[in-house]
Amino acid sequence: MKPYKRILRPSSVDSDNFGHDHLVDPRYCAERSQLVHAYHILESDFKKLFDYIELNENNKTTFSHRIYELILRTCTEFESNCKGILEDNNYTSRGNLNITDYFKINKASKLNEYQVRLNVWSPNPLIIIPFNEWNTDTFTPLSWYQNYNNVKHNRNANFHMASLENLINCMAGLYVLLASQFAHHIFSPYQITEMHSSDENGYISVETSVFSIKLPTSWNESEVKNFDWNILKNDTNPFDNYTF
């Protein structure tokens, strides 16, 4: 049995062990450091907003050019990751890849089951399930991605969609997509290993994280990937392609 490229699977039904060693092998994804680095630049710029906008329920609809810029950059990274996952698994489409193609990743990676928590939100921590609308067998648009496209293509009419709430949902969506590929290796673009903590509710994070994340737990026996990476890594082709 071999792991898939850029698709995270546990090694046991009853375990959160995802066989992390293979996730940093360049044959799994040659661009991990660049992809994670790009996210952390976005997160750094997101933190700068905290000096001017209180992360509070009353400010969800706040919109600005800075927020607009971050939404465009975040969703561009989301699209780039989706395309990379599909292309690295030899997925082909008759036309340019779009959101209906990206939807296919949900079935492979259970994106709709990931939960993201923003602890610094008030009056209570904010729980975001950015792919909840994809909890379906047929394609359903993602509200935050639609809002991104609306404001990108007609900013004059839709500038209010460049809101703090929409930015948080976009960033959570990108964060989930990265975690669905690299697990806790999303916490640093520079190091292969990274210490992280898990709380009593199953959210993992590091001290500098804006977000905490909870991974899916509904994997069944047919979906897990049991393998010995110490042996498999010597194979000339240690990864399988996922058939979307």
Image: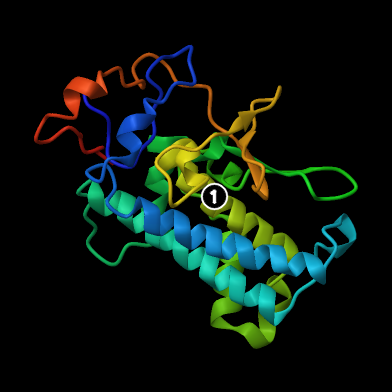
Is 183 left or right of 244, judged from the image as shown? right
Where disc 1 sits, the SS reads helix
Question: Is residue 163 placed above or below 198 in the rendered structure?
Answer: below
Res 12 → quadrant: top left
**In the orientation shown, which residue stands out farthest toward the left?**
236
The x and y percentages for residue 65 are 68, 81
Residue at coordinates 33% horizontally, 40% vertically from top-left? 24
**In the orientation shown, which residue stands out farthest toward the bottom?**
156
Res 82 → quadrant: bottom left
**Front residue of this view, candidates 78 and 144:** 78
The x and y percentages for residue 145 are 56, 62
Is 89 left or right of 59, judged from the image as shown? left
Location of the N terminus (image quadrant): top left
Question: Is residue 14 placed above or below 237 in the rendered structure?
Answer: above
**Front residue of this view, candidates 59 and 186:** 186
The x and y percentages for residue 5 are 27, 40
Q: Amino acid at mark 1?
A: Tyr
- Whether residue 190 can be seen here: yes
The x and y percentages for residue 70 are 60, 71
**Front residue of this view, candidates 206 and 80:** 206
- Residue highlighted by disc 1: 175
Residue at coordinates 65% horizontally, 48% vertically from top-left? 208
Is 32 left or right of 43, judged from the image as shown? left
Residue at coordinates 59% horizontally, 83% vertically from top-left? 154
Residue at coordinates 38% horizontally, 59% vertically from top-left? 34
Question: Is residue 67 placed above or below 34 in the rendered structure?
Answer: below
- Whether residue 137 can be seen here: no
